[in-house]
Image (cartoon, rainbow, N blue to C red):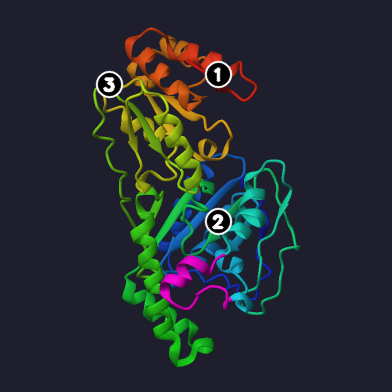
Amino acid sequence: MTAQRADVHHSVSTWRQPLPPTASPRRDALVGEIAQEILARGTGRLLVGIDGFTAAGKTSFGHELAERLSAAGRPVLRATLDDFKKPWKDRHLHDRESGEGYYRNAYDYESVRRLLLDPARSPAADSCALCGIDPLTQRDHSAERTPLTPDTVLVVDGVFAFRPETDRYWDYRIWLDVDAELSVRRGAARDRNWAGTDAESIHRDRYLVAERIYLDEVDPLPRMDAVIDNTDFAGPVRLAPRRRPALTGRGAFDALVVRTDYADEDGWRQVRTALAEDPELAVHVVDDPAWSGADPDEVRTAAADDEDLSVVFLADGVTMTAPHRALLAVTVLDRADCDDEDHARLTEFGDRFRTVPAGVHGVHVDLSLGNTDFEEFAAWAAEDPEGVLREA
């Protein structure tokens, strides 16, 4: 049975671009492939981020993707980060015209989170705003709400989509790859109607400089679910995504802590301080933005190469923001490492639990020595009202 097409809700912004005409069967097939991968992530709400250089084709791809998702019966919301920039009237307060200033100051990430991403991420929220400030009219649309359903797919395009301020929200990440010079040419041609003869210099000296800062500081490409060469609109090519770096360098007796959230530096400092308070804890900390946004299964797979390791600890978004600063302890044990009966027993209370930093040493040592099994720690954590192991 063919699914009934669902609605696609677009931002009210006057910056909105139209749905492009079908370019080729090849492009249509690739968009369909990506849509199927997104739908496979689950039937609940999903957040999809599309990034790439200016004029890489992000908005067009987002519109095409939204049509395929809606055709599969999933309600879709379309938004662009350009609708959440700071008002131009405030530009005297911050530099927005240099490349550095554009990267640091143009976007209002607090509004992106409060109006769009936090509601979309919260099961209790039933609406969100698809536009903050219209980039052209400067009208404030933040009070205009669009309904959220339990199965909504939010598709958001925009440069810097995977900065630390927003990176943790996405269920699926797409990078549209084009050459820097092609980005400048395309963008200048597109924006000449409002930028005039300054269009090329704006793209080369402001946008391109900002994007290079972003790539240097954030290095988002290793975290992509799909990287697409969009040089030829009719003939896009899916590229092999860059792999995350190996988890190497751990001492034989060290616990392994991998930071996967980069949105809260103060929270991370508190976590490091708490870990350092335990004089018995020897810990190898992986603090590499290439691991930003990694899910527990990714980290588990990478850590599984270490045959002497039983558990890995993730410093994720909950770790950074919750008062207890509890890390996520994930068993390195994989179903392939034991039979179904043993795997079911060892993961009776799940394959992960949270522990305060003071519990890392005890969990790591006892699991390494075989003094305690993983399911025992997970059971003790499950007894806590917040699901946190308070000591080990």
Q: Which mark is residue 61?
A: none
Label 3 crowding class (10 Å Cα cut-off): few <14, some 14-19, many 20+?
some
Question: Picture coordinates of residue 380 (x, y %)?
Answer: 55, 14
Judged by depth in the image, the label closer to the viewer, 3 or 2, is 3
83 to 252, vertically: above or below: below
Q: Quadrant of residue 11?
A: bottom right
Task: Say which amino acid is labelled 2.
Answer: Arg
Q: What residue is disc 1 on?
A: 381
Q: Quadrant of the N terminus?
A: top right
Taking 386 as reference, is 142 above or below it?
below
Numbered disc in front, either 1 or 2? 1
What residue did someone put label 2 on?
Answer: 68
Q: Could you say which is closer to the camera, residue 201 or residue 224?
A: 201
Locate residue 309, reporting x and y percent. Answer: 31, 22
Q: Give the secondary structure at mark 2.
A: helix
Dot 2 alpha-carbon crowd within 10 angstroms: few under 14, some 14 to 19, many 20 or more: many
- Of circles 3 and 1, the one toward us is 3
Sequence order check: which comes first, mark 3 or mark 2? 2
Residue range in magenta is: 91-107
Above or below, 154 against 297 in this view is below
Q: Position of residue 387 (x, y in %)?
A: 59, 23
Q: Amino acid at mark 1?
A: Ala
Which element type, helix, strand or loop, lies under badge 3?
loop
Residue at left offset 35%, top offset 66%: 212
The residue to which callout 3 is attached is 253
Answer whether residue 211 is magenta in the image: no
